[in-house]
Amino acid sequence: MELDEFSALFNARFDESPVQKSIDDITQQIKSRSGTALDRILRNLLIEIGVAFACIIGMSVVAYRIPSITLHWLAGAVWVLSIIQIAAFSWQYKQLKATALPMAVDLRSHLQQQIRVIERFVTIYLAFCLVSIPVGFVLGGILGYTIASQKRTDPFLNPIDKLHPGPLGLLIIAAGTAAFLIGVVYFFKAYIRWLYGRHLDQLKSCLAELDQ
């Protein structure tokens, strides 16, 4: 090989290395950012599982210490919802944890898989919360009406039994209840957005940068 040919090959390799280094750096940054977003989602799942266990324990103590039919039914509802949450979130955690393993060579398909899993989870979680609100409200009304019609004494409902609101008072209660339910809906949307939605957006941003 002539000296000029060797020099040309050496210069060509030297000229290409900054470009390749830049691509590698960008890919590494995307991996780091997406990994951070996924780690935070996994952390939040574990926190919510822990909160569900705490709710079961807390409501068990309350139901044991206060002889109230209403609280017993409320504790039962919390137990059922908490058990569903623990099972669903544990399954979701394992599924997401599997996607976090460094097995995929194609970073794009890896991110797409993570985004699909999280999007499905967020959609189902929000729908479950929005359905639970009216269902819980209706069941609570039925329970309260049943206890009142049977003229049972319930220490949890005693303060309510002492109220005798007129038409205006009933209107205020109805308006307050409607405002409360609307507020709960917006709260759950913001809550889920804060725990999972913003990190999902970060993963989508990483995928968009990768496609550029």
Image (cartoon, rainbow, N blue to C red):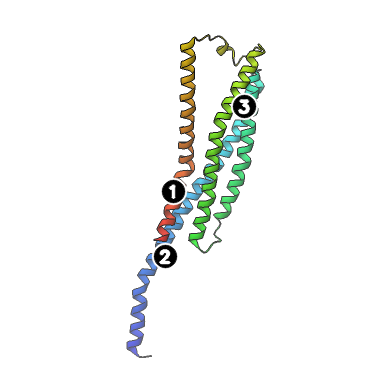
**Residue pointed to by mark 1:** 201
Indicate which disc, 2 or 3, sits on the residue closer to the N terminus.
2
Tell me the kind of residue under disc 2. Asp
Q: Residue at x 54, y 59 (%)?
A: 102
Q: CA distance from mark 1 to mark 3?
A: 35 Å
Q: Secondary structure at mark 1?
A: helix
Q: Position of residue 164 (x, y in %)?
A: 53, 8
Tell me the kind of residue under disc 1. Asp
Q: CA distance from mark 2 to mark 3?
A: 52 Å
Indicate which disc, 1 or 3, sits on the residue closer to the N terminus.
3
Indicate which disc, 2 or 1, sits on the residue closer to the N terminus.
2
Q: Secondary structure at mark 3?
A: helix
Q: Position of residue 143 (x, y in %)?
A: 63, 21
Q: Residues within 10 Å of mark 2 (few under 14, many from 20)?
A: few
Q: Quadrant of the C terminus?
A: bottom left
Q: Secondary structure at mark 2?
A: helix
Tell me the kind of residue under disc 3. Met
Q: Residue at x 59, y 32 (%)?
A: 54
Q: Residue at x 51, y 47 (%)?
A: 119
**Residue pointed to by mark 3:** 59
